[in-house]
């Protein structure tokens, strides 16, 4: 059917030209979508205090690095090795230096100095060097030996703070009584708009928020705010060309893979979410070269979008959020992230006392971010916009 410029319903020829024709719809142009919150979903529980805490633990480390510049008699035959953390080793440990196939046996540990047997089991010789990674393969215990001293890690308490999101609505009696174009009830419309704004701000705070440096819990005169994702990632922060990370200003597939591999080596987590702004989303779309795109003669649509990125280190959904800094890419394990409401303080509407011909009310919500095991996540910064 040809385009007539009229709505199909009620477009009769007898429509008076001077009659005001306004559709019963108010279109909102401002951005208010919350793709990251939608991806994370509802929290499984509520926060119970304005200071929300959770417990984290780690396994005993099974690697360390050499802290020694010269070796006696030489790097291939030295039987005394100084490491950064001697407490990680015990007698009977079998070590693998770097990527070599040599196995080294530990026979004594004094402070940070290991006495070792080189080329254990007739394995090939290798050269040690300062900063070389030593991986503990396993510990070989003696038959009939006494139980070794117990070793353990200490659980740590992590915390974040709840943040109050609020907005006030106030509609006069007249505004509620008169007929509005596109609006059945002005009060309900204002509540809907303010809620959209608060959800938008919640996602922005989850990504970019920061708690105060002093008195972060807040009081009647100090506002309380939450630490966001960007603020909490410390271990896996990657900058192009720094510490062996691939160089360049534009995001590339080798950069993403290098970051995913480093995170995988740091933790048992698996990154399953890549969150980017529009700038870096376009770069990810370009991971598939134009020459590799094929379309049949009958196809009438051109797709140049990557919604899921699969690598050796995980299958990642690519989430486009306008609140991510333009020069950054967030690499997240969504199973370790929750946005929790304070108990009984999810987004809700509370009528306020009226002192005249009006209907005032307040929209409220109090939320925090539980960001577990920060070294299971990562961020690439310093990319070209």
Image: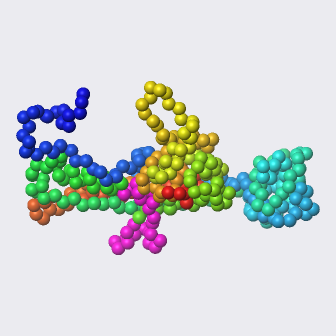
Q: Which of 55 and 237 is in front in this view?
A: 237
Color style of the picture: rainbow
How far across and how far down the image is residue 192, in percent? 26, 51
Q: Quadrant of residue 76?
A: bottom right
Most prominent secondary structure in the magenta stretch?
loop
Front position in the image: 354 or 129: 129
- Rendered location of residue 112, percent (x, y): 79, 64
Question: Residue at the spot x=9%, y=56% of the render?
Answer: 174
The residues colored magenta run 201-224
Whether residue 213 is visible here, answered yes or no, is yes
Point out residue 338 in the picture as x, y percentages from the top left corner: 46, 51
Residue shown at 80% from the left, 53% from the top = 97
Picture residue at 11% right of the left edge, 46% below the top: 20
How many labels sit on residues?
A: 0
Q: Compared to 161, does 287 lie above or below?
A: above
Q: Can residue 145 be seen in this view?
A: no
Magenta stretch: includes residue 223:
yes
Image quadrant containing the N terminus: top left
Relative height, residue 274 to residue 64 (above, below): above
- The picture places residue 37, in percent across and down from the top left corner, at 41, 49
Residue at the outermost right position = 73
The answer to whether 291 appears left or right of 346 in the picture is right
Image quarter for residue 148? bottom right
Magenta residue check for 48: no
Q: Residue at x 45, y 64 (%)?
A: 210
Nearest the viewer among 383 and 350 is 383
Q: In this view, does 339 lie to the left or right of 82?
A: left
């Amino acid at each position: 059917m040809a385009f007539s410029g009229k709505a199909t319903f009620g477009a009769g020829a007898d429509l008076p030209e001077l009659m005001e024709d306004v559709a019963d719809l108010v279109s909102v142009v401002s951005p208010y979508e919350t793709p990251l919150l939608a991806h994370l979903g509802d929290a499984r529980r509520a926060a119970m205090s304005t200071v929300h805490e959770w417990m984290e633990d780690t396994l005993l480390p099974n690697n360390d690095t050499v802290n020694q510049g010269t070796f006696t008699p030489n790097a291939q035959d030295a039987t005394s090795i100084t490491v950064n953390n001697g407490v990680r080793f015990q007698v009977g440990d079998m070590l693998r230096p770097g990527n070599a196939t040599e196995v080294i046996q530990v026979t004594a540990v004094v402070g940070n100095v290991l006495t070792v047997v080189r080329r254990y089991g007739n394995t090939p010789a290798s050269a040690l060097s300062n900063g070389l990674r030593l991986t503990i393969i396993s510990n070989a215990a003696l038959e009939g030996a006494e139980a070794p001293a117990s070793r353990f890690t200490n659980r740590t308490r992590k915390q974040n703070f709840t943040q109050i999101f609020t907005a006030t609505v106030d509609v006069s009696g007249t505004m509620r009584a008169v007929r509005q174009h596109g609006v059945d009830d002005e009060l309900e419309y204002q509540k809907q708009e303010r809620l959209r704004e608060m959800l938008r701000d919640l996602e922005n705070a989850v990504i970019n928020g920061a708690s105060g440096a002093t008195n972060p819990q807040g009081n009647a005169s100090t506002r309380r705010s939450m630490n966001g994702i960007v603020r909490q990632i410390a271990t896996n922060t990657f900058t192009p060309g720094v510490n062996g990370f691939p160089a360049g200003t534009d995001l590339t597939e080798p950069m993403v893979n290098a970051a995913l591999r480093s995170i995988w080596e740091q933790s048992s987590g698996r990154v399953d979410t890549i969150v980017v702004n529009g700038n870096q989303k376009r770069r990810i779309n370009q991971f598939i070269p134009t020459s590799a795109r094929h379309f049949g003669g009958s196809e009438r649509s051109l797709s140049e979008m990557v919604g899921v990125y699969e690598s050796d280190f995980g299958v990642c959904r690519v989430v486009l959020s306008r609140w991510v800094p333009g020069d950054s890419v967030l690499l997240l394990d969504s199973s370790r992230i929750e946005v929790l409401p304070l108990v009984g303080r999810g987004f809700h509407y509370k009528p306020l006392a009226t002192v005249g011909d009006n209907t005032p009310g307040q929209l409220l919500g109090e939320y925090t971010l539980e960001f577990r095991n920060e070294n299971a996540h990562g961020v690439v910064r310093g990319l070209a916009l």
